[in-house]
Image (cartoon, rainbow, N blue to C red):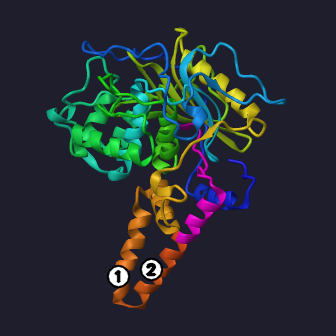
Amino acid sequence: MPAPKTTGRRALLVTSAALLSLSVTAPAALAAPPPSAGPTAPAGPTATPPARMSTVGGARLGMPGTQVDLAPGVPVLPKDLTARSWIVSDAESGEVLAAHNAHWPLPPASTLKMLFADTVLPRFPKDTRHKVVSSDLKGVGAGSSLVGIKEGSTYSVHDLWLGVFLRSGNDAVHVLSAMNGGVQQTVRDMQDHAEELQAGDTQVVSPDGYDAPGQVSSAYDLTLFARSGLQKKDFRDYCSTVSARFGSGEIRNTNRLLSGDSDVPVYQGIAGVKNGNTTNAGATFTGVAERGGRVLLVTVMNPQKHEHNEVYKETAKLFDWGFQAAGKVSPVGELVPPKSAAPGTAQPGASASAHAGQTEGGGSGGKAAASASAGSGAGGAGIALAVAGGLLVLLGGGAFLVNRRWPLPDLMRRRTRP
């Protein structure tokens, strides 16, 4: 990603960029999978947003309808946007450039898998292997999108996550949930993590996003999940992968802006994130793209124009607008940081520690500092480690508090695997 404009932001990005490698592949056409549906699916959402919605991120984000400041020099919003809810935001600064019913709680479909991955992905090393038993696949909904997990077969955690991100495999989600203590434990973990991310519109019922009574999220919350997940190297890696080997065959990413389709070209600068489609949710999508040193997040929920790949077409229009409007349009709100990283809610050390855990190791940075502190009584080396760890934590906290930004490491963009 081109060098950022601020010195603090540049240092953080250069450090994390050293961990990654880029590879680009040619687009691959892929037909859309059929939406999942179940015989006991709940009734769809109402046709109009609630009169009162959450104001997390700013009062205007709680207002129904389109929120944007079209001052002189700001391009007009694209025509023919039919989605019930959408939001365009700067992934690094957190500025919301424009939104439409941003906090409307709607069925999320498989975009909820972003929260699942952000919650569970750090818990298992990717080379861990698991032999699937029948109970692992219990409760996979009828008509679910599947990657083809077989009972009695053994899979690496790495392959299971490829199944989640590329094929939106509900079977892979259920196997990983079983490893995590079961579906209900995973639902509780996801709900707790949503609360930590200040995603108050979200109610988790099924970890895979399958239609379930009471399961909702919002364009705002889905954007928070994407932004949090993208702090993790493995999350960035998986969501940007176009195709990969799985078992004896190959799987391709069902994100059309990443893999391309007959009526949707690969979007310039696309780097993920996740799509979804169910009977009650309609089509949903959150995407991240980088252009000219700026990283944008766009979430689109349930376009009412029922044309092929409409959710991707409307997302592409909003990306185009966002890249043209960024730096010109006044924000109408912001993406809030996690509770543990929010300025004014924790000491700088605690804030930076939580942020470091979110970034790459799923909490390992904070645990390392705690271990050094606990061992300080053993001698000078322990004290030195504790001081050094504490200093790094404080420096990290200072950078976050001063810049009020949540920097994204260099994105993987489009990747293929052998």
Q: Nearer the viewer, residue 156 or 411?
A: 411
Residue 28 seen by the camera: no
First of labels 1, 2 by sequence position: 1
User: Magenta segment: does it hold 404?
Assistant: yes
Q: Secondary structure at mark 1?
A: loop
Q: Residue at x 52, y 55 (%)?
A: 342
Residue 76: x %, y % from top left: 76, 22
Res 386 label: 2
Residue 103 seen by the camera: yes
* Residue identifier under label 1: 375
Q: Is residue 134 above or below residue 281?
A: below
Kindly indicate the quadrant of the structure image that contains residue 75: top right
Extent of the magenta region: 394-416
User: Magenta segment: does it hold 227?
Assistant: no
Q: Secondary structure at mark 2?
A: helix
Q: Residue at x 33, y 34 (%)?
A: 204
Residue type, numbered disc 2: Ala
Residue 41: x %, y % from top left: 29, 16
Residue type, numbered disc 1: Gly
